[in-house]
Amino acid sequence: MNRNPYFQGQATTPNTYYATPNQGQYTQNQYGQTQYDQYNPQAQYAGAFADQQARPGAMTYDDAMVKTLILLAVAVVSGAVTMGFTPTIGSNNILMLAIGTSLAAFVVGMIAAFQKMVKPWMAIGYALLEGVALGALTGAVDQFYPGVGLQAVLGTVIVVGVSVFLHVSGTVRTTPKGRRVVSVVLISYIIFGVMNLILVWTGVLDGFGMRSGTIGILLGLVIIAIAGYMLIGDLETVKLAVQKGAPREFAWTCAFGIVMTILWIYVEILRIAMIFASDR
């Protein structure tokens, strides 16, 4: 993953990166070599994109915005269509569809993670698969807890809006240390989630397992806050890539990261909405 600027610590924050060379942030020799295989996010964009600042075809904010909207549209439309067919597909089939497309999306995401720049077909394929998976999941859940899907959508819009505001206003900026802490927490959360899923599937625990009740809600809120922090980092990556003259194709990588984080936020909010609904 360290070959991909997005996955390599999410680059770095503007307030710790934009220093002149004589301030010690980077040296002249970094402009003459590719930094993809080194863990130095501050030098990543300097080495990869600094020589492209004066070239035509450099990435712009509009490029990143358009690509992000395309991926979001693919995910939303595919999810809405899948959710609409949920009643006719059947509960067993819809569950298999959700699991199958989730695994496929995971594979595509892992392949993209090892690319220097995410290919358009990978980003669109991921958004399509994830949209179908989340549409199937939301449709199935909405049959048991009517309205949770709409609640999750509204909650996601609010969290994304707040994250964008905090980024634009400069109120919150990520740091290399903060990103490392988030990475550790994220890995721990994934391990916890897998263990919880196994315990539920084997019948050791029921319901939401270790994520039931108040503990599940508090854990979900923490994860949503972390995801919001990561989204701010995604937006900083866009800003940094534009200022460093990244090639226009890199907009797909930025959009891929933003959409991946937004869909993650949706999943966590949907989970919290389900917990609240189950306690009614």
Image (spheres, grey):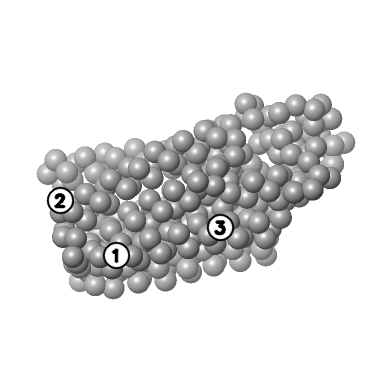
Q: As shown in the figure, which amino acid type bears the numbered disc 2?
A: Asp
In primary-sequence order, the first of circles 3 and 2 is: 3
Q: Amino acid at mark 1?
A: Met
Q: Which mark is residue 206?
A: 2
Circle 3: residue type: Thr
Mark before the other along the chain sequence, 1 or 3: 3
Mark 3 vs mark 2, foreground winner is 3
Relative to the observer, which residue lies in front, 232 or 109? 109
* Residue that numbered label 3 is attached to: 68
Tell me if I can see residue 279 in this picture: no
Residue at figure coordinates x 50%, y 39% from the top left? 112
Q: Answer few, some or many: residues within 10 Å of disc 2's Cα (few below 14, many 20 plus, some between 14 and 19).
A: few
Q: Residue at x 63, y 50 (%)?
A: 251
Marks 1,3: beta carbons within 8 A: no
Q: Which mark is residue 83?
A: 1
In the picture, measured across the screen, residue 11 lies left or right of residue 90, that is right
Q: Earlier in the sequence, mark 1 or mark 2?
A: 1
Label 2 sits on a secondary structure element that is loop
Q: Is residue 62 left or right of residue 130?
A: right
